[in-house]
Amino acid sequence: MSQHAPLILDVAGLSLSAADRRRLAHPLTGGVILFGRNWSSRAQLGALCAEIKAVRRDLLICVDHEGGRVQRFRTDGFTHLPPMRALGELWMKDALQATNAATACGYVLAAELRACGVDFSFTPVLDLDHGESGVIGDRAFHRDARVAALLAKSLMHGLLQAGMAHCGKHFPGHGFVKADSHTDIPVDRRSLKAILADDAAPYGWLNSSLASVMPAHVIYPKVDARPAGFSSRWLNDILRGRLGFGGTVFSDDLSMAGARRLDGREVSYTEAGVAALAAGCDLVLLCNQSLGEGRAVDELLDGLAEAQLKGLWQPAEASEQRRQALLPTAQAPEWEALMTQPAYLHALGLIP
């Protein structure tokens, strides 16, 4: 069994630099998250993914590709997928048509990414549309947790048909709070009972089919003083214990404001990473820090290695197995072959 590789890092540009290669070869690196700046064309994206896999076959190549405004690649043949709220609106008119459309969206999303060499997308959003959150907004399927769960399950089915795992986010729910955790630390003052009955319900219902979950950088003070992604109570007692989830837990981006203050003080990336792993995250993300000299990325790699030597965190074989389980096993189609594939063409016709 290889050592636990918990870090998901980003790369600066359209191809790998020597610094990128060095960081990706580090034994603590488990994957890469791509952004719009890593895209110029399908050919370039395919070449970048091949470069990443040449460093290490087992690196998980990830992207935030949901549809609507969160879709990193939108030109050179990529289908413009609707925001998830469009599927919720369709559900109100025709529930069965909406589930078919959701499966089609998942299939097209995953098939196009995989044809370019991307392994994994952080989707579906399970947050509920309370009408308060600007950062979630139309990324959510619906206000009703049952509708959100069923449409998410349909989308996940489409992803799986194209050979891609999935990630429910942001546990136990980011839709109720107004503040944006990229720039702020949102606080949701509801009781655990209220949250479990509403926003967190999809995680219990989908516990047997969700491959991974990303917790919210939101504080729920009636449950824990720490944001959910740094809370063993949320991740171990509630998500794994009470809701029966057995898949992978990703931290949300450690560079977000919601991750940089713990217990009332500013923390380093290393402290945040160690806290997330200690709380029950299997993998931690650090995004948009490879630009320039990428000092923060090196600081986190070195800091985590040092923390391991000091016994501040222990590599977990179960976490490494969960990471590896997210890698696709089926062969991805070439783009040209995908364009004539009957299942893909059928799915395209179902997207609203």
Image (cartoon, grey):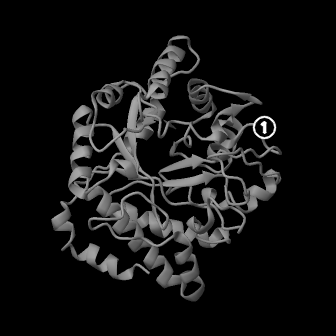
Is 41 left or right of 316, judged from the image as shown? left
Q: Residue reaching furthest bottom?
A: 93
Seen from the viewer's position, the closer of residues 128 and 161 is 128
Q: Is residue 347 above or below residue 3?
A: below
Q: Is residue 96 above or below residue 210?
A: below
The answer, for residue 210, to whether it is visible in the render is yes
Is 333 left or right of 327, judged from the image as shown? left
Residue visible at 44% across and 40% down? Answer: 322
Q: Residue reaching furthest front?
A: 292
Seen from the viewer's position, the closer of residues 227 and 100 is 227
Is 336 left or right of 109, judged from the image as shown? left
Image quarter of residue 106? bottom left
- Expressed as whole percent of the image width and height from the top left, the position of residue 6 reads 46, 32
Q: Quarter holding the C terminus?
A: bottom left
SS type, badge 1: loop
Seen from the viewer's position, the closer of residues 142 and 22 is 22
Image quarter of residue 135? bottom right
Residue visible at 60% across and 84% down? Answer: 92
- Expressed as whole percent of the image width and height from the top left, the position of residue 204 reads 63, 57
The answer, for residue 1, to whether it is visible in the render is no
Q: Is residue 332 above or below residue 228?
A: below
**Label 1 CA crowd tier, 10 Å (few <14, some 14–19, many 20+):** some
Callout count: 1
Residue visible at 61% across and 56% down? Answer: 203
Q: Quarter holding the N terminus?
A: top left
Q: Amino acid at mark 1?
A: Ala
- Expressed as whole percent of the image width and height from the top left, the position of residue 245 reads 57, 48
- Expressed as whole percent of the image width and height from the top left, the position of residue 191 reads 83, 52
Q: Is residue 155 above or below residue 62?
A: below
Quickly name the residue at label 1.
Answer: 225
Q: Residue reaching furthest top?
A: 310
Image quarter of residue 121? bottom left
